[in-house]
Structure formats: C-alpha cells, structure tokens
Image: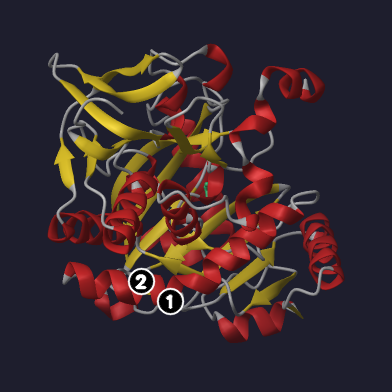
C-alpha cells in the first residue's frame, strides 16, 4: 500500500467474536488492531446464555458444524485460562456437563432419536430413565419421562467472558473506538478502512467484518460480498437462586417440552439463565409477554421450584443467522476484507476456534482446514441461487 494506515487491522464489531479475534491477532502475531463498536459487548454476546453444548444441541445434517463446535469446546479450558490470566479477571468457564430431558412420551421419542444419532456419530452421551435424571438433578419434576447425560457439554458466563475479553484487549494494546461504523471504505476493489459516524476515517490494511446480524447492513461493500446474515430474535430470562436454595441445578438442563426446546443454565453464583425463544422479526428487540410466558411455563414444567425465584431480567437479543445455520469465516472475494459472522446459536461456543483461525488468516496464513467449509464464498450469487 502506498499510504501509512492508521492501524494494521480494523475490526467492525466488539462482541465476543470481534474482541477474541482482536486479542488473538494482537497477542499471537503483533499487528496493531483497532475495534470499532458504539456499545462493546452489548449485542448478542450480552443476551446469550453461554452454553457450550455441541453434542446436546446436535442437529441432523450439521456434521461439519458439529466438528467445529467440538474442536472449539476442546480448546475452551485453555482459552479460558489464558484469557483469565491475560485479563486479570475470571473467564466464567464452568465444566458442569449437561442433562437433556423430555417431558412427555413424544418428547422422549425426540431425545431417543437424538441419542441414536449421537451414538452413530461416536459421540459420548448416556441415556437415563426419569429416576436417573432426578438422581443427578433432584429438583427436576417427577413428570419427566427420561433424558440424556452429556458429560462434556459445559458453559461459560458470557458476560464475564465479554468483560475478560475487553480487559485482555486493553492490556494487549488493542484500541477500542466507541463509535458506529457508517461505511466500509472500498477503493480499486480493495477494502482499506472504515468511515465512522463522526466523520473520521480509519485506514487499515485489513478490515474484519464481525458485527453479528448488523454485518449485512453496513454500506460500502459490493453486493456480492455482503454476508448473508439475518437477525433471529431470542428472548431470555435471568433469575436468582437465593443462597439457601443452592444448588437448584448443578448442570445445564436442556428440555424438550411438548415439541419445543428450551434450556436452563445455572451459574455458580446463583444466577439462572432461562432461554430462549426464536423468531424472525427483523431487528425488533422488544420482549413480549408471550415470550416470557412460554419460557416460564416450560421451565416450570421441568423444574417446578423456579416459580419461587426472583426474576431479575428479561432481554431479547438478535442472533446472526446464516442460510445454512453455520458461521461465515475467512477471506472474502474482496481484497482486504475478512468476514467472521453468522454464528447463529453458537457464537459463544465458537469463540475460541473463530479467534484462532481468523487470527491465523489475518496473519497471512492459508485458511485452516477446519474453517474451509465455512468460507464466505459459499453464499456467492451462484451458490445462493442453488440454495434458494
Ligand atoms: N445457543 C442458544 C441459543 O441461541 O438460544
């Protein structure tokens, strides 16, 4: 390049994805990194529950996503320990395991199918009778009809993760600019920086688009490289288990309740996260009475004791959905532009693997094999037509 850029890398979006890429790129490879976001860590990363559950959330036809999720989960303990050390703050990682339970006979059949599929893929999960489920989690309702124990599916407190990433980035010298990106700057078929809402421009050798579901809304890019992401709303509740009732639950509980699925995620400090609804309603983040009702009703079917708990917070976030429910990672067809979005239900789970692989790409390495199936080009116009 013929000019001196303000920064080697500018990252649009300071959620867990943008921040973890910034931290990894800066500390592993040494470039100057600037992250731009008007409200760092306050989007989907704030609303999430933090389940690290690739095996219990397995879906048919998503085997390459499963591999990515399992590899990311495998890296989590080391990633979390390194982050806590770098940040001087706890990461919120909790190796607690997950139990998936069924309410009625149809729900049990759904979980039985899941168990067969998991076993076929060589995944570790154990079928439990209702009584065995309640031996592990005594506060579960006697009405449940059975379940699965997945010992290797854990959790991380997503809000502690955000706080640790912000602190680690700060200590590593990553610059955080609390502004909105108004436009990605593209000249001569190369992305070379961003224009901020305050009119300032930041030039960079590489631009990383990691703005979650807003990644498709930022002007400046040729249409063929705009990531195919859309908002998928999720409502979530936070309750508090009083010390006298601890532990209400000791592990993540996923429930299949009359055909719907939901989850309860207990933190070590007594917070209980209950989620999540799923709607396609554009960028609407209003919490509805119906959403809260459904979550409480289903949670109560599984764990009747929850009705005694103080309800601390109701919140809606927007997951960045992609056409095949998998993330969009790597170099785009536009020189200078790297994409890291579309993580849908798995942004927190996929944080370590996204950070490691995208930082490697930014350092000029070849695209790691693990993320080759998730390249931005799979949704190029011709590919989009085939998928439609
Ligand atoms: N990963 C959980 C959710 O998106 O609701």
Find residue 42 and name its label: none
In percent of width and height, residue 71 lies at: 59, 67
Separation of disc 1 and disc 2 at Cα? 5 Å
In this rendering, position of residue 273 left or right of residue 68: left
From the image, tell me which residue sits under label 1: 77
In percent of width and height, residue 138 lies at: 54, 81
Contact between marks 1 and 2 (CB within 8 A): the answer is: yes
**Colouring style:** secondary structure
Label 2 lies in ligand 1 vicinity (Cβ under 8 Å): no
| Visible residue check, residue 365 | yes
Count neighbours of disc 1 (C-alpha within 10 A) and say few if under 14, some if 14 to 19, many if 20 or more.
some
Eyeballing the image, is 36 above or below 163?
above
In this rendering, position of residue 236 left or right of residue 270: right
Eyeballing the image, is 332 above or below 219?
below
Element class at badge 1: helix
Count neighbours of disc 2 (C-alpha within 10 A) and say few if under 14, some if 14 to 19, many if 20 or more.
many
Residue at x 60%, y 70% (from the top left corner):
141
Camera-side residue of 208 and 261: 208
In this rendering, position of residue 163 left or right of residue 378: left
Eyeballing the image, is 355 above or below 195?
below
Residue at x 69%, y 36% (from the top left corner):
324
From the image, tell me which residue sits under label 2: 80
In percent of width and height, residue 8 lies at: 26, 40
Quadrant including the N terminus = top left
């Amino acid at each position: 390049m013929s000019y001196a850029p303000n920064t080697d890398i500018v990252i649009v979006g300071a959620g867990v994805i943008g921040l973890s890429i910034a931290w990894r790129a800066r500390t592993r490879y040494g470039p100057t990194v600037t992250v731009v976001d008007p409200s760092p860590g306050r989007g989907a990363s704030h609303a999430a529950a933090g389940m690290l559950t690739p095996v219990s959330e397995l879906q048919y036809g998503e085997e390459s996503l499963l591999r990515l999720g399992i590899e990311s989960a495998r890296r989590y303990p080391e990633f979390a320990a390194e982050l806590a050390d770098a940040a001087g703050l706890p990461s919120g990682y909790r190796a607690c395991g997950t139990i998936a339970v069924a309410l009625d006979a149809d729900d049990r059949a759904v979980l039985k199918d899941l168990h067969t599929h998991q076993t076929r893929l060589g995944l570790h999960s154990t079928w439990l009778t209702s009584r065995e489920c309640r031996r592990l989690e005594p506060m579960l309702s006697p009405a449940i009809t059975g379940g699965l124990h997945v010992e290797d599916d854990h959790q991380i407190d997503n809000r502690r993760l955000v706080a640790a990433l912000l602190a680690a980035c700060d200590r590593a010298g990553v610059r955080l600019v609390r502004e909105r990106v108004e436009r990605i700057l593209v000249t001569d078929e190369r992305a070379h920086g961003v224009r901020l809402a305050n009119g300032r421009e930041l030039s960079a050798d590489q631009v990383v688009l990691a703005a979650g579901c807003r990644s498709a809304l930022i002007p400046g890019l040729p249409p063929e490289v705009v990531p195919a992401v859309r908002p998928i709303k999720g409502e979530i509740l936070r309750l508090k288990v009083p010390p006298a009732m601890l532990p209400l639950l000791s592990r993540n509980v996923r429930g299949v309740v009359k055909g719907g699925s939901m989850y309860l995620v207990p933190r070590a400090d007594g917070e209980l996260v209950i989620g999540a609804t799923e709607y396609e309603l554009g960028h609407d983040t209003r919490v509805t009475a119906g959403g809260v009702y459904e979550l409480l009703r289903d949670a109560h079917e599984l764990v009747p004791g929850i009705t005694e708990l103080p309800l601390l917070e109701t919140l809606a976030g927007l997951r960045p959905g992609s056409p095949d429910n998998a993330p969009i990672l790597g170099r785009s067809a536009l020189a200078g532009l790297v994409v890291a979005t579309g993580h849908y239900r798995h942004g927190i789970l996929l944080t370590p693997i996204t950070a490691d692989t995208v930082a490697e790409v930014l350092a000029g390495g070849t695209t790691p094999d693990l993320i080759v199936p998730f390249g931005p080009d799979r949704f190029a116009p011709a590919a989009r037509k085939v998928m439609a």
